[in-house]
Structure formats: structure tokens, C-alpha cells
């Protein structure tokens, strides 16, 4: 029995130790990288670090069961601390096997009722980052400091967002911030779905959950309004004649508002 128990412990230890950044140890300076997320926005590691940010990376792939389980927790963490506008930056890095479309669907399915952190697919260069860090088990969460060094190579196991908060270095007290996107506050009090989230802009369906929309607005990433419609319904369709790119759909009810991102190809 002891031999069996010992064997199981060794096996468990081997599995757990794989879930980390195998190419770096705590205190190592990590290599710089530039990636493009599924919305076409570039992210440079050293730019964030040099701006004094602490950067949390989430390595995942779309059919990974534990990744699916904990994605909403990482999204909640991102949402609580200002959606990368505060002292913390969160980025999800795919293992290099999934496309933009697959990563978008993954986020919409498992991200929970929160704003989603930037996610990088194989299309945006995630594979080379995954290889550089030597991640071989998923999910792997790690923390990089403003001095470009690895502060935590394996934030695991998770219980809730307090697991991430427990990794804050001494002296780091990030402000809890409400997320804003181009000045549009996403309170998450309004629940709605946009289908499809990636399209040619024609016949986009918007479905509310137990609420009635009063206005629908669409903004480009500069904040310019490209579409507006006054409505009084919870289920509607509209079309956009705009250039290819990423847009924000804002829905306003009598009491609140929320936004979601869509991609027009």
C-alpha cells in the first residue's frame, strides 16, 4: 500500500510540476515579446513592464478542461482591477493550436459574466511565446514584474481570485477599478448576446436577457460612433456597412448599459 501511495504521490508531483514556465526560474529576466490579440490590438511585454505594470499571463488552449473551469476566475480578476487600465495587466496566451475564431468562442463560452482579458491565438503569435516560456501543462498562470523578472512561475492551485491576489508582492496594492472601454462604462448589469461575434456585418442578432434595450450604438476603437438605433425590444437584428475591424456594441436600457466586442471581416 505504501508503494502504491508513494507511486501516486510521485505521479501527482510530476503532473503538478509540469504546470509552470519550465524555461524560466523565479528571478530570471524573461524575453520580450509582441503579440496581437483576437481584436487586432498589439501587446508588448516590455512596454507594460517599463510602465510599471505587473503582468499576469494565462497559458491555455480551448479544449483544456481545467482551462475552461478557471477562465471565468481569470476574467473576474481582470475585471476587478480595471481591465488593464490600472497597475495590473492580464493576457491570455494560447498554446499555438487555436485560431482567432476558436479563441473568441472559448472566451464567450467560458469567460463568465465579466469583461474578457486580451487573448492571443496562434494567428497573433501565441505559439512562439508558449514555446519560449516552455509551458507544457495547462492552464499555467505566471506573474512578471516591472523589472522584467519572473516573480511567480506557477500560480496553482486556484480557489478563486484571492489566489491571484495572494501573489501581490509586498508594497503592491492595486486599486480596484471599474472597467471602461473608450470611456464607455461596462457595468455588466445588462446581459445581452451578439450573434455572430465575427461576421461580414450583415444580419447581426442581438438578444437581451430579461431586459429591454432602448438604444444600440456601435463604436470603432477610436470611440467614433458608426451606428445608432433607438429601439424598445429585447430581440432585434441589424446590419453594419463598415470597414473590416473590431467594434464595440453598446446596449443601453432605462437603468444601465454594457458593451461587447465584435469583429467585422
Image (spheres, helix red, strand yellow):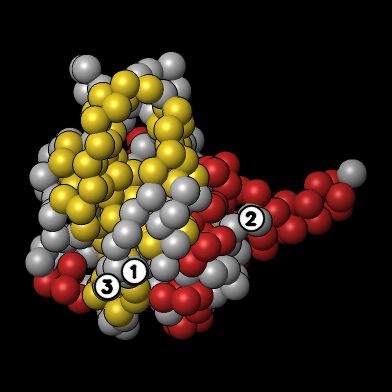
The residue lying at 38 percent from left, 62 percent from top is 264
What residue appears at the point 44 percent right and 46 percent down from the top-left corner?
204
How far across and how far down the image is residue 75, in percent?
38, 44
In the image, residue 210 lies at what x, y percent? 43, 16
Q: Quadrant of residue 153?
A: bottom left
The disc placed on residue 244 is 1
Q: How far is disc 2 from disc 3 in space, using C-alphas? A: 25 Å
Q: Residues within 10 Å of mark 1 (few under 14, many from 20)?
A: few
Q: Nearest the camera: 217 or 98? A: 217
Q: Identify the residue position indicated by label 3 in the image.
A: 42
Q: Is residue 179 above or below residue 57?
A: above
Q: Are marks 1 and 3 in contact (CB under 8 Å)?
A: no
> Which residue position is annotated with label 2?
64
- Which comes before the other along the chain, label 1 or label 3? 3
- Compared with residue 130, is residue 258 higher up or lower down, i.e. above or below? above
Q: Measured from the top left, where is residue 164 in percent x and y?
A: 35, 45
Q: Quadrant of residue 99?
A: bottom right
Instruction: Please indicate, yes or no, whether residue 83 appears anywhere in the rendered image.
Output: no
Between marks 2 and 1 in the image, the one whose residue lies nearer the viewer? 1
- First along the sequence among labels 2 and 3: 3
Q: Dot 2, how many residues are within 10 Å of its Cα: few (below 14), some (14-19), or many (20+)?
A: few
Q: 117 left or right of 195? A: left
- Mark 3 secondary-structure assignment: strand
Q: Label 1, secondary structure: give it.
A: loop
**SS of the residue under disc 2:** loop
Pointer 3 local density, CA inside 10 Å: few below 14, some 14–19, many at least 20: few
The quarter of the picture where the N terminus appears is top right
- Determine the CA span between mark 2 and mark 1: 31 Å
Residue 116 is tagged as none
Which residue shows up at 81% across the image and 47% down it?
Answer: 5
Report whether 63 appears left or right of 103: right
Question: Does the CB distance between marks 2 and 1 fall below 8 Å?
Answer: no
Amino acid at each position: 500500500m505504501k508503494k502504491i501511495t508513494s507511486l501516486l504521490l510521485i505521479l501527482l508531483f510530476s503532473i503538478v510540476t509540469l504546470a509552470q514556465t519550465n524555461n524560466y526560474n523565479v528571478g530570471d529576466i524573461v524575453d520580450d515579446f509582441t503579440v496581437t490579440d483576437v481584436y487586432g490590438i498589439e501587446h508588448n511585454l516590455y512596454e507594460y513592464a517599463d510602465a510599471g505594470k505587473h503582468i499576469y499571463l494565462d497559458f491555455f488552449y480551448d479544449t483544456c478542461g481545467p482551462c475552461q473551469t478557471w477562465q471565468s476566475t481569470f476574467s473576474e480578476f481582470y475585471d476587478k482591477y480595471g481591465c488593464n487600465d490600472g497597475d495590473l495587466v492580464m493576457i491570455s496566451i494560447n498554446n499555438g493550436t487555436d485560431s482567432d475564431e476558436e479563441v473568441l468562442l472559448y472566451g464567450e463560452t467560458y469567460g463568465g459574466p465579466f469583461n474578457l482579458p486580451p487573448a492571443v491565438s496562434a494567428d497573433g503569435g501565441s505559439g512562439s511565446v508558449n514555446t519560449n516560456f516552455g509551458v507544457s501543462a495547462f492552464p499555467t498562470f505566471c506573474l512578471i514584474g516591472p523589472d522584467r523578472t519572473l516573480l511567480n512561475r506557477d500560480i496553482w492551485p486556484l480557489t478563486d481570485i484571492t489566489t491571484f491576489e495572494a501573489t501581490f508582492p509586498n508594497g503592491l496594492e492595486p486599486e480596484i477599478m471599474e472597467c471602461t472601454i473608450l470611456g464607455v462604462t461596462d457595468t455588466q448589469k445588462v446581459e445581452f448576446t451578439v450573434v455572430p461575434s465575427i461576421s461580414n456585418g450583415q444580419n447581426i442578432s442581438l438578444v437581451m436577457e430579461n431586459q429591454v434595450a432602448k438604444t444600440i450604438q456601435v463604436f470603432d476603437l477610436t470611440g467614433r460612433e458608426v451606428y445608432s438605433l433607438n429601439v424598445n425590444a429585447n430581440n432585434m437584428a441589424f446590419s453594419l456597412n463598415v470597414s473590416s475591424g473590431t467594434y464595440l456594441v453598446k446596449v443601453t436600457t432605462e437603468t444601465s448599459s454594457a458593451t461587447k466586442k465584435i469583429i467585422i471581416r
